[in-house]
Amino acid sequence: MRLRRTDPHTLAGAYALDSLGDVDREKFERHLGVCEACRAEAASLRDAAGRLAEATAAVPPSWLRGQVLAEAARTRQQPPPVRVAERVRRSWHGVGWPAAPRMAVAIAGVGILVALALGTLLVNDQHRLHVDETQRGQIAAVLNAPDADIMTVPAKPHGSATVVMSHADHALVLTTARLPVLPSTECYQVWVMGTHRMRSAGRLPSPKQGMTAPMIVAGIAAGDQMGVTVEPASGSQHPTSPPVLMLALPSD
Amino acid sequence: MTAELPGERPSAAPASELAGLLAKVARGDEAAFAGVYDRFGTVVYGLVRRIVRDPAQSEEVTQEVLLDVWRTASRFDPGQGSARSWLMTLAHRRAVDRVRSAQASAQREARAAVAATDYDVVAEEVETRLDAQRVRRCLDSLTELQRESVTLAYYGGYTYREVAALLGVAVGTVKTRMRDGLIRLRDCLGTES
């Protein structure tokens, strides 16, 4: 689409100024996910843009302070994302796999990102990813669930997975971007690990334009963990290689 | 290539002060949160007011921004940029979301005329504060097209396509000017103290 025709790097300024529309911003953020130099530049430009606010300081009405502080006092705070990563490292280690790769988990504004995920996965009219109709219904249900949590996890050595999970539906939707391309003798297999057992959730669809079609994983319980490994094309009974990505699913 | 290096700013002191406050806020420290309000409330409110215009809506958005700080302080990651930048991003995005969603396109077009002259207003406000004077000086070091592209986007809350339409230039030109302008601004603010 547009970003592919133009050099994405030129969007860094408009991005730092929050001047991209939703579609362009989503694309640029995907690009940031794979371009470390771009992340550094975008951060420095955003910093510079933020300094422009120094020219507009104004004193808010005095009653606002008390209202804001009172509102904060009755507002629950979000937990740090680190907690999730640590839980993963601990328990996947327990099943005999090598220590988990480091990862960062970002859980962000669900409304925008659900729209983003839908836009990316289902409304990408130039490169529509094939999803069958029943799955499409289940996927839409999860993406639209009021309790949907969205998480993006980096994969090793590159690429990422985006998961939208609904506790109410006991299901998640998984999609990946830019994972290493595998030979036809191998596949990516998805695993779900609960307290007592690990089960296969099936193989990832083959990628189109670097992305895999959204895959629904049902029967998820609070505290489960999800991992992806490289397996023989026919799939395995148990994981036989270190995970390329892992994610502890939020427990509430 | 200095353009590739984020680097520490000379004005890092208030930023690390904010980072310290955010760490406490993340642990539920209401006094630290009051400290964030007292120290940065004017910058947040000023920016929001500048973009949103309407005082009542500006107060609402300012409250939303500060509650975002309270709720998500634990998500602030110093590895991703300065605390100040994190805060201003929250504020700017909230304000821009408000003007983009709430205002009908007709009203937005009417705002264009006002926004186009905004730089003069900035210049006036700028005279009152030292920080602001530095920003003004650095804005002055930009080419006219760079400056207009940056200020229409940042203070006006316009998308780059809208900025291109307002300035009557190609969108590609505006994108480039925004990036070049911010690089110049960054380098100017980074080297002045």
Image: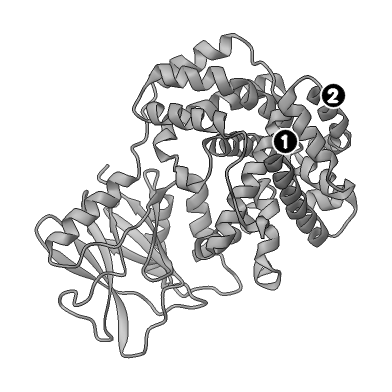
Secondary structure at numbered mark 2: helix
The residue beneath circle 2 is B124
Q: Position of residue B177 (x, y in %)?
A: 80, 54
Image-based side of A117 in relation to A217, left or right: right
Screen quadrant of the N terminus of chain B: bottom right
Image-based side of A168 in relation to A121, left or right: left
Q: Is residue A182 visible?
A: yes
Q: Please name the amino acid that badge 1 sits on.
A: Gln
Q: Nearer the viewer, residue A172 or B118?
A: B118
> On the same chain: label 1 and label 2?
yes
Up/down of A86 relative to B137, above or below: below
Alpha carbon separation for disc pair 1 and 2: 27 Å
Screen quadrant of the C terminus of chain B: top right
The residue beneath circle 1 is B103
Image-based side of A36 in relation to A182, left or right: right
Colouring used for the render? one colour
Report in which chain the residue with disc 1 lies: B
Locate residue A65: give its quadrant.
top right
Q: Is residue B102 visible?
A: no
Q: Position of residue B121 (x, y in %)?
A: 84, 27
Of the numbered discs in the image, which one, if any, rests on residue A88? Answer: none
Q: Please name the amino acid that badge 2 sits on.
A: Glu
Q: Nearer the viewer, residue A147 or A188?
A: A188
Residue lying furthest left in this view? A196
Report in which chain the residue with disc 2 lies: B
